[in-house]
Amino acid sequence: MSEADAADLLKAMVPLFRIRPVFEDSCRFGGSWESLHAPNGKGWAQFHMVTRGSCTVERPGLGSQRLEAGDILLLPHGDSHAVRSQIGGAVGQISIEVKNGVRQRATIDADADTELLCGRFLFETSDRNPLIAALPDEIIVRTAGEPLLERFRHLFIDIRDELDAGRVGSEVVAADLARALFVMILRDHLADDASGDSTVSLLRDRITARVVSAILDDLARDWTLDEMAAVAISSRASLVRAFRKRAGIAPMTFLADLRLTIARQRLAGTSDPIAKIAGEVGYASEGALSKAIMRRYGMRPGALRMAEPGEARSVTAKTS
């Protein structure tokens, strides 16, 4: 990445330092278990840090992802999802005890072999930052066996120890450490030219970045190539070349893909009506969006929203 590209990305990242981390769950699970997570709403990201054992994360339309000890999963758009054990069978009961404002969740009648720290980040400037909208559906940092990522593990351990100790102010210290960890994860992701993220790649080029920012600011607009070229202060041919160089696709193809991607993110990450989402991302009708979602993800828009997590398995709840 050139120095100018790095400077542009750093400038775009500045608002990401204004985030509010919230630790919600410290989990110790064993046997067969599952934890459902509903959409969080616009501006909220979700994260899971695996400190011991392994688990599977499933999101409708996107398949499953296996996480091992030392892995950190960030869902920048707050997708609904399920975290499950690697083994099948009848799902066991989970108890809940609130300690220091964090839910201590544990399986009943099963020795714990998997431990996770789970929570959310609130982007306090999400409406005006194109970088947030351009983030991929998931970012995974795998720290096990990676000496270059030792700094992540140190923060990881310090966060867990603060929450486990339960001392006065532990939640504040843990939140500040989590904020630092989040920014470091994003910095490494954005600096990785091999990340394969076409939208972020386009933000590294001054010409294409102008177009991406304008589109994200008015996704419902009936964009033409001439209008994009005017925003880019470029000829149509130069704009097409720039898009193909950075993302490997033409500007209008990028627009169509971006609309569908953001529609999926809002379906999975908010409870907004489908018709409202369709209009905001540039589809003529709810039916048009439904057909496009079916072609891309093989399911109806409503199926991309995982059911609200039930409390039937949470048989005890105490506060300390």
Image (cartoon, helix red, strand yellow):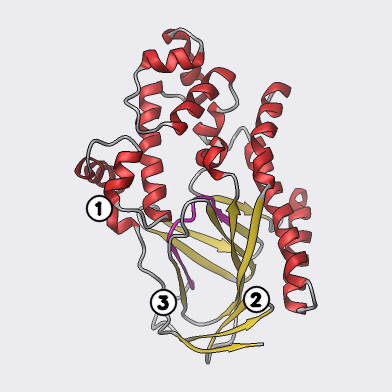
Q: Kindly check if marks 2 and 3 are in contact, taking CB atoms under 8 A apart as contact.
A: no
Q: Which residue corresponds to the image point at 41% horizontal and 22% vertical from the top-left?
A: 251
Q: Which residue corresponds to the image point at 68% horizontal and 41% vertical from the top-left?
A: 187
* Residue 84 image position (x, y, % from top left): 47, 71
Disc with the residue nearer the chain's start (2 vs 3): 3
Which amino acid is tagged 3?
Answer: Gly
Residue 88 is marked as: 3
Q: Is residue 194 above or below residue 1?
A: below
The magenta segment is 73-85
In this rendering, which labeled residue sits more in front, label 1 or label 3? Answer: 1
Which amino acid is tagged 1?
Answer: Arg
Which amino acid is tagged 2?
Answer: Gly
In this rendering, which labeled residue sits more in front, label 1 or label 2? Answer: 2
Q: Is residue 240 visible?
A: no
In this rendering, which labeled residue sits more in front, label 2 or label 3? Answer: 2
In this image, 2 relative to 151: left or right?
Answer: left
Q: On the image, which quarter does residue 100 sit in?
A: bottom right
Distance in Å between CA atoms under marks 1 and 3: 27 Å
Q: Is residue 302 above or below residue 229?
A: below
Q: Which residue corresponds to the image point at 26% horizontal and 47% vertical from the top-left?
A: 275
Question: Which element type, helix, strand or loop, lies under badge 3?
Answer: loop
* Observer-nearest of 177 and 71: 177
Distance in Å between CA atoms under marks 2 and 3: 31 Å
Residue on which the image places disc 2: 101
Residue on which the image places disc 1: 300
Q: Is residue 63 above or below residue 285?
A: below
